[in-house]
Amino acid sequence: MTPTQLSTADRISLISVSSTMKVAAEADRLRQQGIDVVDFGAGEPDFPTPDNIKQAAIRAIEGNFTKYTPAGGTSELKQAAVARHKADYGTDYKPSECIIGVGGKHILFGFTQALVNPGDEVIIPVPYWVTYKDIVNYAGGKCVFVETDEAEGFTLTAAMIEKNITPKTKIVIINSPCNPSGAVLAREEFEKIYHLTSSKGIYLLTDECYSHFLYDSSPYSIASMPGSKSTVLVAGTVSKTYAMTGWRIGYGLAPAEIIGAINKLQSHSTSNPTSVAQKAAVEALTGPQDSIPLMLAEYRKRRDFVVPRLRQIPLVECALPAGAFYAYPNVKAVMEKGGIKTTLELSERLLNEAQVAVVPGEAFGTDHHIRISYATSMHELERGLDRIQAFVEKL
């Protein structure tokens, strides 16, 4: 065989290893060496999965619910997903317009694979969650990045989107609340974007991963707009809302023909999501919802500590996040002071010299930020921010 025959497929070179997963792996490696690392990298709740959900999984195991299910998820879970979405947002999807996947990321991958042809353009506001860029590139699409207004809390407007629409635009992705900035798109602006995209026959993909974690407004889905079903795509997940990141269950809501296309893809890739995890997700969606406001209250407490504390660190600026559980401080002046060229370099130095794990802003499309997850204890937040301040003061 020639060397070319033994090489990986060209399409793999279009994507990179997830930066958040890479940071988590490096922090874990240091911990295995006995190094005391404060981890601000992980984008997952530090709360345990609620007991009623765990008990549902145990009952599923004891009842031998351990066989294959349909590739797109059980009818029971699809019904639970559409019923929860209706109760929370006033939508009216049918189980035939729902698919269950292996986490929200899997749903997003399914949407792009099912809809994006080579050369199609996908509009992505900046900063963006790390995976958007790679799944669009993998599908052969072209990412069109739209800068948001950091001075106004990373504000996004329909006018910003409109300036970047071309005849090749296929999808606009909105993540509100946003990972990594915590920005929340105003409902009126979201509706303007919907009217813009729907009038031009463009899909509007709403990533609702953090939709229940808003500090100053009520949960909202653009899919509740009358007549929106034909062009709005919903990517949802139980991962953050119910502290179920490791269970790997997400759901998509879309026109039945798109759901069918994703189901076809899943039938030849993942087969079904884990049977036991699906039973747990049914309980999460249909059972008590009281864990959500408890987590939100704790995230608010942490946010209200972290942002003022970051602003006390010399040369650091930080917009106030309106949702999710991330702070996204601007560290441009810190980098200039220390002669640090990239936030990747800064993140590596913070990990190796201060033993604090953060995610570099380059992963999210910006050059002068780091992402700090405050989904960890107040004790760890205090220790980590003290270490970051000490590091900055020594530069």
Image: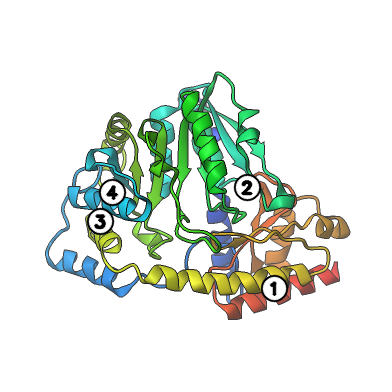
Identity of the residue drawn at 46% across and 71% down: 295
- Dot 4 falls on a residue whose secondary structure is helix
State the residue at coordinates (66%, 44%).
Answer: 365
Mark 3 crowdedness (10 Å alpha carbons): few <14, some 14-19, many ≥20: many
Q: Earlier in the sequence, mark 2 or mark 4?
A: 4
Mark 2 sits on what residue? 364
- Residue at coordinates 41% horizontally, 40% vertically from top-left? 225
Identity of the amino acid at label 4?
Answer: Val
The image shows residue 289 at horizontal and vertical percentages of 34, 67
Vertical side of 349 occupied by 96: above or below: above
* Mark 2 vs mark 1, CA separation in Å: 21 Å
Helix, strand, or loop for circle 1?
helix
In the picture provided, is 371 more to the left or to the right than 135? right
Q: Amino acid at mark 2?
A: Phe
Name the residue carrying label 1: 385
> Disc 3 or 4, which lies upstream in sequence?
4
**Type of the residue with mark 1:** Leu
Label 3, label 2: how many angstroms apart (C-alpha)? 31 Å
